[in-house]
Each structure stands twice: as C-alpha cells, then as structure tokens.
Image (tube, grey):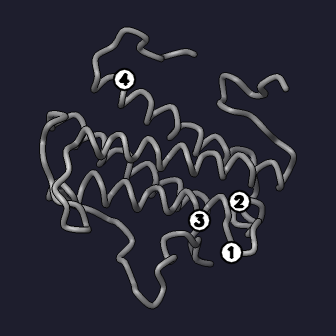
Amino acid sequence: MEGVPYTGGEKENLRSSLDRHRDVVLWKLEGLDEEQARRPMTPTGTSLLGLTKHLASVEYGWFCETFGRESDAVPYDEDDPDADMRAEPHETTADIVAYYRRARAASDRTIDELDLDALGTSWRGVTVSLRWVLLHMIEETARHAGHMDIVRELIDSTTGYHRDVPDLPT
C-alpha cells in the first residue's frame, strides 16, 4: 500500500494505521447524494453520516478532552446516548465531513505535540497514555470503517477495502 511506513518508528506506524482507516471513512461517503449518505440502513438507524459524526466526536473526546485540550465533541446526554450517531436534519454531508476533518486536525495536533507515553484522563476517569488512545482509535475507526463498507454496499453495491484496493479477490 502507498504511504505505509514498513520500517517506521512506533508513533509513525500507529499514526499511519489510523490515517489509512480515517481515509476510508471519507472515501465511503464519496459520490453519494444527501439522501444516500444519511439513509438509515439498519433497524437501529445506522447511516454513513451518523458513523462519520460519531467518529469525529470520539476523536475529539479521546485525543482532545483526555489530554486537556479544546474539544468540540457532541456532549453526552443520558436521555439520548446515541446523539453522536445521528445526522440531524440541518446537518449536511459537507457539514459532517468538515466536522470530521476538524476533529482529525485537532487530534493530529495532539499526536504531533505529545510523546506516546504522555498521560491523560479519559471520560471514565481512567489514566491512559497517548499510545493507548492511538491503539483504541485505530480499533474504533477500523471497526466503523467496516460498518461503513457494509452500509455503502447496501446503498449502491460499491465495495472495497481501501481506495488503493477497491475490491479484494474472493
């Protein structure tokens, strides 16, 4: 794959892995109209825009709030715990993609400025390292990028693991 640091350092490799999955999130939205991007495709209402909004919010939470930095995460609401998984009627694809890009940029500043061993306090009150947050966000982003792959296939039959590898052989 292009851009993979096969012999890079730990931080470079973690960041590269996260970036590859982040790129897939944006790729899964390409070429869709507003209705397709926000269409709920599961009984629980999962949509491509909802997943993108959720990933932006959790990036803000884990990379920014955990390390005492400015955040624009969707506030948690006990009465509506899935608010960050839903595109509101006034939120367009462009709005949510811009939100995701802002979250990614804010997260990248944290990654760039801190050592892997830097410690922060998670929303659960647990002390975590930047290394742990990077690993967690790679898992979270990869998991939801996989969901997005299935949702996109249900919308218009488009499949693919990554932009550079549109379809894997069966």
In the rendered image of this protein, does residue 3 appear above or below residue 111?
Answer: above
Q: Quadrant of residue 66?
A: bottom left
Position of the N terminus, as image quadrant, is: top right
At a point 64% along the width and 46% down the height, the residue shown is 146
Q: Nearer the viewer, mark 2 or mark 4?
A: 4
Q: Which residue is mark 3?
A: 50
The residue type indicated by label 1 comes to Thr
Label 4 residue SS: helix
- Of the image marks 2 and 1, the number of the one nearer the N terminus: 2
Q: How many residues crowd around disc 2 within 10 Å: few (fewer than 14), some, or many (20 or more)? A: many
Looking at the image, residue 14 lies above or below residue 105: above
Residue drawn 83% across the image and 54% down it: 154
- What residue does disc 1 label? 44
Which badge, 3 or 1, is on the more N-terminal residue?
Answer: 1
CA gap, disc 2 and disc 3:
9 Å
Whether the residues at callouts 3 and 4 have beta carbons within 8 Å, the answer is no
- The alpha-carbon separation of the residues under discs 3 and 4 comes to 28 Å
Q: Which residue is mark 4?
A: 13
Q: CA distance from mark 2 to mark 1?
A: 16 Å
